[in-house]
Image: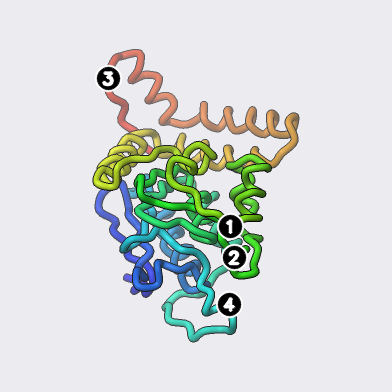
Amino acid sequence: MTQYHTILVDRGGPVARVTLNRPEKRNPIGLDTCGELVHVLTALRDDPAVRVVVLTGAGNAFSAGGDLGSMQGPAAAVSAVAPASLVELFTTMHDLGKPIIAMVNGHALAGGLGLMVACDLAIAADTATFGTTEIQVGLWPMMITAEITRNVGRKRTLEMMLTGRRLDAAEALAAGLLNRVVPVAELEAVTMKLAGEIADKSPAAVALGLRAFYRSADLDLEPALRYLQAELGRVLALEDAAEGITAFLTKRAPVWKGR
């Protein structure tokens, strides 16, 4: 089993939990962390027992952003797996075929906010804060722009990026960055309940649906419709689709085969 240095992994049951695990640094995202996340997500993608991934942070932060220390020069690698960039991490996340739920326990700032937004769903504690704070240190949130602009309107995005102001959980919810905000004491229970509900769905249909969602998003309308028409044919051809329809008509619970 691979030994990770910046993350923890718990594969118990159909919901796997991945925890950013450098709480003393507020879980920064550097090349080593990106590499370990890419490595573990690839392993989880290929594990048929895992149907949903929950991503969270240790301590009082989800992630406070990029590892600023490493930006001033290459640091000695500490991970047993190859380093990776945010490009590789975000593309791996969007091509996973399994839902990733961000369980946001604290600050999600700068690159940490981008990581949260790259997850398919996000549930946050009411004490969490959010922001593109890069401008405060003379930087710009280049890599996470593509993720945020696909979730938040242009005016709100530019205000966030130009001011670096932090949003509270209610503001982040209103901006479209989150699905739900819950009391911090309820965060884990609510997140795991949602993960369990999704894990009960057809993994084959979920995989096709997630990939189609992301791949069609950047197409023009007519190519998107033609692509989705072809993907609908693939969904209808699934054994799980036949099972789901039969189960519905005979009033019983479906038994998914994942194909």
Q: CA distance from mark 2 to mark 1?
A: 6 Å
Tag 2 residue: 136
SS label for mark 1: loop
Tag 1 residue: 164
Vertical arrangement, residue 214 with respect to residue 146, above or below = above
Front residue (pair 165, 59):
165
Query: What residue is drawn where x is 38% and y is 60%?
Result: 61
Q: Nearer the viewer, mark 2 or mark 4?
A: 2
- Expressed as whole percent of the image width and height from the top left, the position of residue 182 reads 33, 40
SS label for mark 2: helix
- Amino acid beneath label 1: Gly
Tag 3 residue: 252
Front residue (pair 122, 82):
122
SS label for mark 4: helix
Q: Earlier in the sequence, mark 2 or mark 3?
A: 2
Q: CA distance from mark 3 to mark 1?
A: 52 Å
Tags 4 and 3 touching, CB below 8 Å: no
Tag 4 residue: 71
Vertical arrangement, residue 86 with respect to residue 122, above or below = below
Q: Is residue 74 left or right of residue 205?
A: right
Tags 4 and 1 touching, CB below 8 Å: no
For disc 2, the neighbor class at 10 Å (few under 14, some 14 to 19, many from 20) is: few
Q: Nearer the viewer, mark 4 or mark 3?
A: 4
Q: CA distance from mark 4 to mark 1?
A: 19 Å
Front residue (pair 32, 139):
139
Q: Earlier in the sequence, mark 2 or mark 4?
A: 4
